[in-house]
Amino acid sequence: MARDLIDFGIERSRHEHFFGREDVLAAIDRHLDGAGASGRWVLVTGGPGMGKSAILSRWLDVEEQRGHRAPHHFLRRDVMDWDRPEAVTRSLAAQIEALYPVQKDPEARPESRLIELLAKVSKHELVPRGERLVLVVDGLDEARSDGAGQNPLPGFLPYALPPRVHALCASRPQYPHLAWLESRSNVRRIDLDAPEWAGSNERACRAFWADQAPQFTPRLDPGLVEEAVARAEGNLLYAVKLKEWLEEQPVEQRRVERLPRGLSGFLEQIWHQLWSLPGKQFKLVASGLGLVCAAREALPLEEIKAAGGWRNVKARDDFLRAARALLLEEPASWRGEQAYRPYHEAFRAFVAEKLGPKRMAKLHGRLLETTAQWPVAEGESEFHGRYASAARDRACARGGRAGEGAGTLPGPQAARGALQRGWAGCARGCAEPRREGARGRRHRPAAPGSAGRVALAARDT
């Protein structure tokens, strides 16, 4: 159905500038080409910022240049319902139906629509013509689960691939449900964190700086560029954010000794800069970042201001100026305002750990009282209605009390308590990227005895 189609143009445009990785793209093609008539899974894994999404997006570009369209979906936790398993199956099925309209079944049941469609396309279209169909799914680890510990992957990935149907997927390597997929014999994995890809990672970072360094005025010192490549540790997200950071520094401050090491070092350095702000300003910026990370959609500044209770007319500008390095700005789509979400899921996890689950639960509560207020007042925007409804659905799914049936929305107090209980569990889970290099040890500010969340709580009193 046309309404099930999702335009991923904005998401893919984030990766339009692509550097290196020809060897990874070639490896993907080898795995797919070597499958023959059998269905095959190709899984690209890597820690935060290693370029998994960019690789899949680039592969889609190349495939389209070859004249082939691959049904695809990008799971994103903070973009509408893109992370819901049923949204993934609807999206993929709609794209396949657009490619093979004869195989569309208007009476298909939602839960079996995708798998039955794949079987028919395989039998009646692909096998007779000797063609293949590749499904591309990015962000397996961002799939929404109905409950703690439940595996959401069977909700949108076929339990078996029919002949000449393949799947190209990406995930962080420590996602606990990957074993469900990797237990199959027809899975080929490309682990960007493995030593065999270290050279590829470094070459991608070097290609990035070869393109970007000449754009600085005056030109960056070659020694600084070389050190930037080394300290990236193969992480392209680090390279991108370091370039933005260097652009904001006075020329005399663009020195080797000021470069952080690795993505975790970069995030700690940004947090230290925020910590050095005057107390009231730091509190404002920290709460704003917490609200953005607690939200499950990009938030306009107007909503951040309302949920944060900011009264100073300069608060919005102060927040944006200080926090921009951690934010992704999305095009105006609500009341003509730009909206903001964490630049990367690793950034969300980092901020959530710094603030702690209690503070994040409190900020979630503020969103429930403002952006997600229920019932939605007459005349409020479509954004408000959608956000409020989605927030209450998540409250039921994550932490609903016994007796709250499927599809039943709790009252405002019950929803708030359920959402806060759910966030506490989510915040504890955010610690996992530490094993992938998303964060190093918690930053300890200069103030004696003040560390992490304890010091933050002291500043907030």
Image: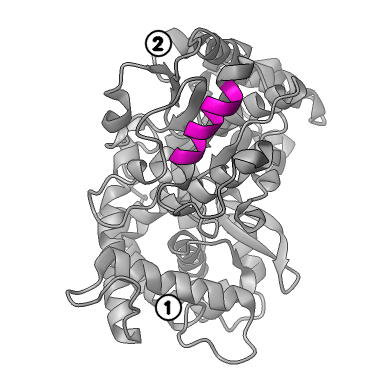
Position above or below: 277 against 248: below
Q: Which quadrant: the C terminus? A: bottom left
Q: Position of residue 356 (x, y in %)?
A: 30, 59
Q: Residues within 10 Å of mark 1 (few under 14, many from 20)?
A: many
Judge from the rendering whether residue 353 lies leftward or rightward of residue 135; answer left or right. left
Q: Residue at x 75, y 23 (%)?
A: 67
Secondary structure beneath dot 2 equals helix
Give the camera-side residue of 76 and 208. Answer: 76
> Any magenta on residue 21?
no
Please give the residue where the numbered disc 1 appears in the rendered image. 368
Q: Position of residue 379 (x, y in %)?
A: 65, 89
Q: Which label sits on residue 195? A: 2
Q: Position of residue 161 (x, y in %)?
A: 42, 27
By secondary structure, the bulk of the magenta-drawn segment is best described as helix
Q: Residue at x 40, y 33 (%)?
A: 172
Name the outermost residue toward the bottom: 378
Q: Position of residue 174 (x, y in %)?
A: 31, 32
